[in-house]
Amino acid sequence: MEDWRKIDIDALDASSRNKRITTKEINETLVSRGIIHHYSNDELSGLITEVESKTYAKDFNGLFVDIISKYPVYSADDEGLKLKFLTGVSTALINCKNIDPIINALSDDEASILIKYCYKIMSIKEFQNNGHYIVNWVDKIIAKFGQGIILRYITDRRTI
């Protein structure tokens, strides 16, 4: 008779019921459990340099497959540097004219990360002038991977 309590009565307590978990708390929990990586300023600066150099060299396949989808920036020390990284990703998405081969080279996980970047970029007011380019990426990703990728984006707690 040890397992007599099937309902967690403490969860029904009115004082804890309306508490909202913030994105910052979720990220701290995921970092502490080793689920996501927390980028230091030096690591993020290195990624920014790589993104800018590959964008300048027009090596978009290498950029999206090797860097952006392999090193998702979920958590960082400096939000300003994270915004600079997102600016580099946005510039790459806008400047890339041949989208189909890149999307065809992505795995499901890589596409899930790329769609997170697209939605994050669309949510920032500074990047909305070129939103039609990002929407084009989203359309192509959905065409290849299906609408389930949007469901995975919505339900995943690991946010960019």
Image (tube, rainbow, N blue to C red):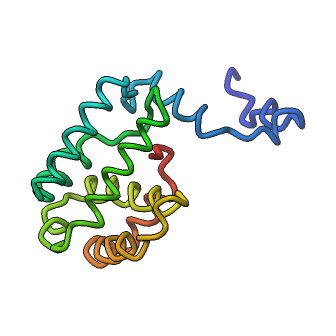
The answer to whether 151 appears left or right of 70 in the picture is right
- The residue located at (28%, 53%) in the rendering is 109
- In the displayed image of the protein, which residue is found farthest to the right? 14
The answer to whether 94 appears left or right of 81 in the picture is left
Q: Is residue 71 above or below residue 126?
A: above
Q: Is residue 4 above or below residue 131?
A: above
**93 and 145: which one is in front?**
93
Instruction: Identify the image quadrant of residue 97.
Output: bottom left
Percent x, y for residue 37?
Answer: 36, 29
Instruction: Identify the image quadrant of residue 98.
Output: bottom left
**12 and 153: which one is in front?**
153
Percent x, y for residue 18?
Answer: 82, 42
Q: Is residue 36 above or below residue 53?
A: above
Instruction: Identify the image quadrant of residue 7.
Output: top right
Q: Is residue 99 above or below residue 69?
A: below
The answer to whether 82 appears left or right of 100 in the picture is right
**87 and 155: which one is in front?**
87
The answer to whether 82 appears left or right of 108 in the picture is right
- The residue located at (43%, 31%) in the rendering is 76
Q: Quadrant of the N terminus?
A: top right
Percent x, y for residue 105?
Answer: 13, 62
- The residue located at (46%, 43%) in the rendering is 158
**2 and 135: which one is in front?**
135
- The residue located at (18%, 54%) in the rendering is 55
Tell me how many marks there are: 0
Percent x, y for residue 24?
Answer: 59, 34
